[in-house]
Each structure stands twice: as C-alpha cells, then as structure tokens.
Image (cartoon, rainbow, N blue to C red):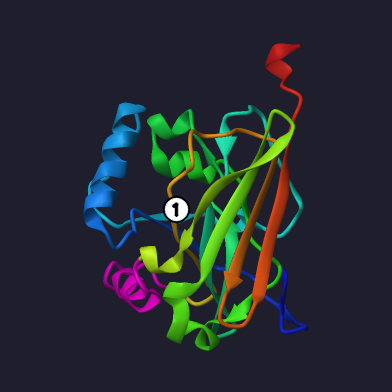
Amino acid sequence: MELICNGTALQWTPKRLVIAGYTGKNQEAVKKHIDELKELGIPAPPRVPMLFDLSPHLLQTASEITVVRNDGSGEAEAVLLDVNGKWYVGLGSDHTDRVLEAVSIQKSKEVCAKPVSKEVWALDNILDHWDDIEVRSWVEKDGKEQLYQSGTLGEFLHPSELMRIVRERRYDAAGMALYCGTLPLHGDFVYGGTFRAEMTDRATGRRIELKYRTKLLKDAEEE
C-alpha cells in the first residue's frame, strides 16, 4: 500500500489492524451511546474501550468498496499508522455491517473493507494540538449530500492513553493500524451511496479527505 506524507510516497504493508471502540473521554456519553445501541439490538461491550482485532488486508485506499447486501454504513475516524517504525495519522472509515452487528460486533467489522486516506500526517507534528483537530463526514440521502458527523479529536482518548491501553492488553505490533473511535451521528444510519469525510488541522489549515462509494454486488441467491 502506498501512502503520501508531505508529498513523499511511503510504501507500507500493514501487519495488524485494530479498531478501538467506545473511546470517548466523556464516559457518561459513552454509556448513553451503549444504551442507544442496546435498543437497536446491539449488545453492550464487556469492557470499555473495546479493541477489535481484524484482518489487516481489509485496509484499502481505493475509492470504491463492494458489498453483497446494502446493510453497512461508514464512520469517520482518525487512524494511527506505524509505518516503518514511525507513527502517522490518517483518516479512515470503520465501515460496518449493521445487521450482523446485532449478532457479533467483531464479525460485523471483519466482513467490511476499511477505507483509509492515502494522505497522512506525521503524528509528532500534531500531537501538541491533537484535541483541536476537526473531523466531519457526509453521506448521500435522497440524492443529496448531508452532514453525518462532526466534532473534534478532543472528544476521544489521547493517542498516548489509547496506545497505553493497547500495549497493556498486548494488541500492539509493528506495522499496526489503529482506528481511534468515531463521533456520534446526526440522525440515523445511512446505508450505501457515497461516504465523504474530512479531517482538518485548524492550526495550519491542512486537510485530509476520504471519499468512497459502495458498490452492491449481484446476489446469486436472488437470481
């Protein structure tokens, strides 16, 4: 996989993919979110934050992902990437099968590709103002783009704290990609279509964009 940082190409082979969930600093808000998910039939996690170990081949920088059923939706997240021993941050989407999620959260994530931006920033360059980094996402609904998520990385555990938890639970590995948690939705899940997200460093004006569309494969069972 090729990534770009400040115009320089980085060749990288991901060795481990971990999705961190329920990583909000405000634990009351996290509990409320868990209760909301329980009402949708999604089981409560056994501990928070949760770490989901997934297949690294799910990571993609392609502009299109494929699915068999239109049951999935995206979630914008900052992604920490260990590229050849140096940490970078990109923008990803934890695309998840919402029907399967009611059965197994880990399986619902494992069956979906995990888009990630080709452009990344050196983590050291933004750590001192990490909390101020803004993330937003948009989806298509009824042929129009609408705001889906908005907030800042300050709503989540700081990378140093999240990585401490990852090490304590022995999930860390060279060549790791770590999704850091997602923002609440403005409304309900929106499936399929085009998902677009931006991560903006307001201190410098730099911006990373992620955009992909979902292609529905022909289902042989419906022929």
Label 1: how many residues lie within 10 Å, few (<14), some (14-19) or many (20+)? many
Q: Position of residue 190 (x, y in %)?
A: 58, 34
Give percent across and percent down for residue 48. Answer: 26, 55
Quick one: quadrant of the N terminus? bottom right
Which sits in the foreground, 1 or 42?
42
Looking at the image, is 152 positioned above or below residue 33? below
Outermost residue on the top side: it is 223
Range shown magenta: 157-173
Say if the magenta span includes residue 191: no
Residue shown at 77% from the left, 83% from the top: 7
Residue found 63% across the figure and 47% down from its top? 138
Query: Image quadrant of residue 103?
Result: top left
In the rendered image of this protein, does residue 59 appear above or below residue 127?
above
Residue 75 visible, this orientation: no
Q: Name the residue under label 1.
A: 183
Circle 1: residue type? Leu
Find residue 220 and report its image quarter.
top right
The x and y percentages for residue 146 are: 63, 41
In which quarter of the view is residue 175 placed? bottom right
Left or right of residue 77, residue 84 in this image: right
From the viewer's side, name the closer residue of 102 and 147.
147
Residue 170, image x, y percentages: 32, 69
Q: In this view, does 16 lie above or below 111?
A: below
Q: Can residue 110 be seen in this view?
A: yes
- Quadrant of image for the C terminus: top right
The correct choice, above or below, for 220 with respect to 103 in the image is: above
- Asked if the stretch drawn in magenta spans residue 164, the answer is yes
Please, what secondary structure does the residue beneath circle 1 have? loop
